[in-house]
Image: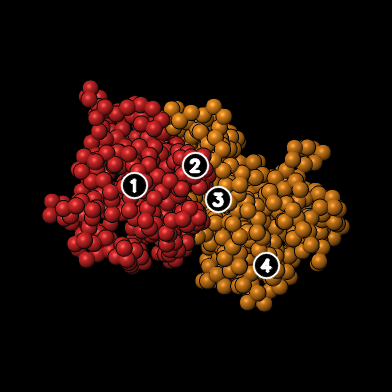
Chain colours: A orange, B red
Amino acid sequence: MRHGGVLPQVDIVYETWGRISPAKDNVVLLVTGLSPGAHARSSAGDPTPGWWEEMVGPGQAIDTELFHVLCVNSLGSCHGSTGPASVDPAGERYRLRFPVLTIEDIATAAHAALERLGITRLRAVVGPSLGGMTALAYAILFPEDVRDLITISSATRATSFATAIRSLQRECIRSDPEWRGGDYPPDGGPETGLRLARKLGLITYRSAREWRERFGRERITGASPAEMFGPEFEVEAYLEMHARKFAGAFDANCYLYLSRAMDLFDVAEHGGSVEAGLGRIRADRTLVIGVETDFLFPIDQQEEIARILAGAGRTVSMVRLPSIQGHDSFLVDMDRFCPVIGEFLRRA
Amino acid sequence: MRHGGVLPQVDIVYETWGRISPAKDNVVLLVTGLSPGAHARSSAGDPTPGWWEEMVGPGQAIDTELFHVLCVNSLGSCHGSTGPASVDPAGERYRLRFPVLTIEDIATAAHAALERLGITRLRAVVGPSLGGMTALAYAILFPEDVRDLITISSATRATSFATAIRSLQRECIRSDPEWRGGDYPPDGGPETGLRLARKLGLITYRSAREWRERFGRERITGASPAEMFGPEFEVEAYLEMHARKFAGAFDANCYLYLSRAMDLFDVAEHGGSVEAGLGRIRADRTLVIGVETDFLFPIDQQEEIARILAGAGRTVSMVRLPSIQGHDSFLVDMDRFCPVIGEFLRRA
């Protein structure tokens, strides 16, 4: 691991869609945001909708009739790949004995998994949010293996604003007495802390404009001012519903590790400056997508990636989208995202 | 109280600076944001700097050689005025038995205090943030008593984004086991929850741009990645220091009541629409100040106040300030705020 420590044995869970070509040169690797697993798209084996259901599929933007699409669950996550909630070879859960996790470790683990499958040069690496950082790290660490690169709402390093938000999310979890220094039982854990952290995430993943249009000042039916501090506005009910869902499905320690990995990431560690780091990338073409209402990974961070790559002689397309759903737009504003990604991949 | 309940006895703490004229027609009322008390400015009796030290004073923007400046501590607060931490006539702390608090109640309590002092018509009412809402409520409820009105980074009602933030702050407090449903001992309380709530406040009071310039990716000296989840970036140390200071000085239940009052406030309750509500204001002149980097009380909410008041025939000055300190600018960017307020008051 980048900051020391060794994982003696690692599982990396992945899913695939579409046939691999005999030359294994049609692989599109998807690396994900903090919370999703490898299930990007429904399949015969698992018909539940994936996290990028409308993006990936036959005839869709990431076309499974052309590409062998492979999505990995990040190292450190809790959706099958080895992470703090996994059991070590001695039969004990890692918990906080899991070594410091970095974005580079996530990229390296994905690379090792592909190596095992005999896949080296990728047709494209695509990543949004944390996954965009992973895609950048992958292209920096394994420059010869990435033909096209797509980063979405990502960054070469976090803003101090984003770090402040994530630090507070982690503190919400660590402050919950049920966290117990990370040693909570497998069926328990800091549900309240995780719920609070997720609410803060939800608040920062969207935009004030979207919320004004969606919720305005709508009240929850039956809510009364006389009731002290219960939820009374629709926006509060929305946050509660989504936060509950998440807290029941995500491991708190995994959340801490993945969240911190985003704050530790700094492209400048690869050669002494952001320019030097991005200068290692050898992709034929890069597509950088940013959203104007994203204040967690703001548009100027996307433009920085595009500007520096172009300055280093790379072929870069920068697309600014006016989506109102903020950082989360890549998950919901498919009418804007699908054409941009589909066209870029077709143009090759 | 607006939503029911009675306070049989109320203290309203205030401080004054400058002499009152024989006609009592030179009074400038200051109503405050959520956390400050009545100590806007140092004095012989209390030489510690006030929350608006540079704004108020002899020869300063709110000139105590011309005006009798009077700052009240809000009803519901914990800096001397009656609030949830106060003891009721039976000798019990109110805690959650304190009735629902609204911005209108805060304005009405301030008005009652001034009445006792024989002060009716005010030369000006000035309020930032929550205080701006209080100033609006004062001018709506007591239209004949307000000659000039100054609102700063305020709103006719909260955005759902701001409500989401404040709802989460309240939940941080309520989720702390030490809150004990509001019944914590006077020397205890949900220090952790209050600290988390304050950190979220601090994050939303400033701007991402200011933090980038102030903190960048500066690390705390001696912080090591090997240390799991301790603070490692300067921005985290900054949040911790300020949140600790606040948590030691503010009552958790008072925070809950004042925070919620901001979410309940809606000028449209006065006549059926925001236009009807603001239409009750009779001020000779209104100054509306907004800050471009404020995302908690965004600039378009300031422009709404100015536009509607102008549409109702009032004389309005709208000033957009390019301060980078976000919502908190009125406390720190004195080079921009003092001239605007000083000139407006002098022009009369």
Residue A118: x, y in percent? 77, 56
The residue lying at 37 percent from left, 53 percent from top is B283
Report, in whole angstroms, how far the alpha carbon at label 4 lies from the one at label 1: 57 Å
Q: Which residue is mark 4?
A: A318
**Residue A32, visible in the rendered structure:** yes
Task: Give the mark toward the camera: 2 or 3.
Answer: 2
Q: Report which residue position mark 2 lands on.
A: B268
Kindly state the secondary structure of the residue where label 2 is placed.
helix
Residue A69 spot, x, y in % from top left = 77, 52
| Residue A22 percent coordinates (x, y) | 87, 57
* Residue A248 in the image, given as x and y percentages of width and height: 58, 33
Provide the residue designation for mark 3: A208
Q: Residue at x 57, y 65 (%)?
A: A300
Q: Secondary structure at mark 1?
A: helix
**Front residue of B120 and A153:** B120
**Given the image, on which type of amino acid does mark 3 rest?**
Ala
Mark 2–mark 3 Cα distance, whole angstroms, equals: 21 Å
Mark 3 → mark 1, Cα distance in angstroms: 36 Å
Pick the front one: B53 or A35: B53
